[in-house]
Image (spheres, grey):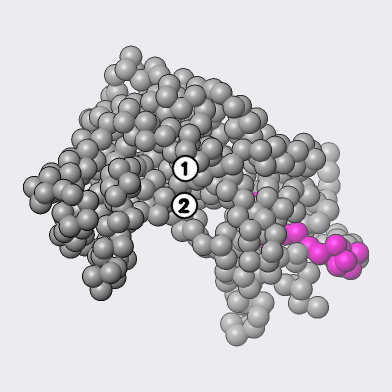
């Protein structure tokens, strides 16, 4: 039997190195949920998040998810978005139903499932994007980036100036007439909406010929809409968002990845973190819990503020609004690595345990090198025995004089399947398996 046939996961499945918040597709969503490892740390964070999200009226609208690069913070934020939207996936079940299958290792899975069930009474629209990827760092404010992605989620153009003109026309009940005019003139509306000049030209014609505007009035109408976007304030953004929640009856949730990198990207400049505070404060005061903001950062919020020359007196409301703070540590990474790389199929465990016992006896018979060994209650032979947890692959702890990497290179043929597995997972096994207390 091959090693990969013993493992619960399919090691041939490609696991992306980076989870991108802006990448949204039902097939991708299904795969990311089915591969997600709910660690004990994630379980605690889920409980904290869901308890806060169930509050119908609150000013604690912010969630700050922190963790070093590779800790899984973006993945976790994306999973939260999937749970809130609850799409029906290609396999015919909902995102929440599929996620519930991932809770088998939780200490209290029924409690988590109950909190997830409570989401059924809270219809939500989620706007999810990566700040550093979707904003022009030198020109766009955070409120502009959020509003742009909000309009795109609502079905308007992905080009901001076109989207804001569409939104303004829609607000006054004119968009459908403009759309009909463009299509009846023989043009493809979707293509026209990708060009600011073309859209403006067609819109002015439609407004003058069908909506009783003069050419100057139509031009001024569209120009005013763009000016509103250029001068958008956190307060006005919040008003647009609250209007949406009232019209649709849905809660509006923004998940913004890598906000920490954005707010510190301008050296010795606190404008961006003050703008973030302004957005959070406006959402809290105007939305009363109907508009939520979830962000990720490599730094904890208090550390991000303390490590910069920001005026701490100005940022008191920021920490108040982001009262829910979820930090992902190396403990989470260790547990994920063990689950992904070491867990075996249940039916193969008796076979593996039998081989393990035989290997233990073999290692007990190995001659012990004549090297100084510190005084210890255990014998030298016992000192180098296997340390294994049930369900894990064995981790052999050899003396430092053995070069395990070199030994494997000599023993394994370069073209063998085992060699390919070692090349793929060897560094991770060495990293997470070298210390028995961490596995």
Point 64% across, 83% down: residue = 416
Q: Which residue lies furthest to the bottom in this view?
A: 415
- Horizontal side of 422 relative to 125 (left or right) equals right
| Image position of 381 with respect to 352: above or below | above
- Residue 69 or residue 271, whichever sits in front: 271
Could you tell me if the residues under marks 2 and 1 are in contact, i.e. CB atoms within 8 Å?
yes
Can residue 319 be seen here? The reply is no
Find the magenta span and give its range: 336-352
Q: Mark 2 points at which residue?
A: 21
Can residue 34 be seen here? The reply is yes
| Image position of 416 with respect to 139: above or below | below
Secondary structure mostly seen in the magenta stretch: helix
Answer with the quarter of the image where residue 277 lies: top left
Mark 2 or 1, nearer chain start? 2
Q: Mark 1 points at which residue?
A: 255
- Residue 174 or residue 63, whichever sits in front: 174
- Horizontal side of 47 relative to 69 (left or right) equals right
- Residue 329 or residue 46, whichever sits in front: 46
Q: Residue furthest top?
A: 313
Circle 1: element type: strand
């Amino acid at each position: 039997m091959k090693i990969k046939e013993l493992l619960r996961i399919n090691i041939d499945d490609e696991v992306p190195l980076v989870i991108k918040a802006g990448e949204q597709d039902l097939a991708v969503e299904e795969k990311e949920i089915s591969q997600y490892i709910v660690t004990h740390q994630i379980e605690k964070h889920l409980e904290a998040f869901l308890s806060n999200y169930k509050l119908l009226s609150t000013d604690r609208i912010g969630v700050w998810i922190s963790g070093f690069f590779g800790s899984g913070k973006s993945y976790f934020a994306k999973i939260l978005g999937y749970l809130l939207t609850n799409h029906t996936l290609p396999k015919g079940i909902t995102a929440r139903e599929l996620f519930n299958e991932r809770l088998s290792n939780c200490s209290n899975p029924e409690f988590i499932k109950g909190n997830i069930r409570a989401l059924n009474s809270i219809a939500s629209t989620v706007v999810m994007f990566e700040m550093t990827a979707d904003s022009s760092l030198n020109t766009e404010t955070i409120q502009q980036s959020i509003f742009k992605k909000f309009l795109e989620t609502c079905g308007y153009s992905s080009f901001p100036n076109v989207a804001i003109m569409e939104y303004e026309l829609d607000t006054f009940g004119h968009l459908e007439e403009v759309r009909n005019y463009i299509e009846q003139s023989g043009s493809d509306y979707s293509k026209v909406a990708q060009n600011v000049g073309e859209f403006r030209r067609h819109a002015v014609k439609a407004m003058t010929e069908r909506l009783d505007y003069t050419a100057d009035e139509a031009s001024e109408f569209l120009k005013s809409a763009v000016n509103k976007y250029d001068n958008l304030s956190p307060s006005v953004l919040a008003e647009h968002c609250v209007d949406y929640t009232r019209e649709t009856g849905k809660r509006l949730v923004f998940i913004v990845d890598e906000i920490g990198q954005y707010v510190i990207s301008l050296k010795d400049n606190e404008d961006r973190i003050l703008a973030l505070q302004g957005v959070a404060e406006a959402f809290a005061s105007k939305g009363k819990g109907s508009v939520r903001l979830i962000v990720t950062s490599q730094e904890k919020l208090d550390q991000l503020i303390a490590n910069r020359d920001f005026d701490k007196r100005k940022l008191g409301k920021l920490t108040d609004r982001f009262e829910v703070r979820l930090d992902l540590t190396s403990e989470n990474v260790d547990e994920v690595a063990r689950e992904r790389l070491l867990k075996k199929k249940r039916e193969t465990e008796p076979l593996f345990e039998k081989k393990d016992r035989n290997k233990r006896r073999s290692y007990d018979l190995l001659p012990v090198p004549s090297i100084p060994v510190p005084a210890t209650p255990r014998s030298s032979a016992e000192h180098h025995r296997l340390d294994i947890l049930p369900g894990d692959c064995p981790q052999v702890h050899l003396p430092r004089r053995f070069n395990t990497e070199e030994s494997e290179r000599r023993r394994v043929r370069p073209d063998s399947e085992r060699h390919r597995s070692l090349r793929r997972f060897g560094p991770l096994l060495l990293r997470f398996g070298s210390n028995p207390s961490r596995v």
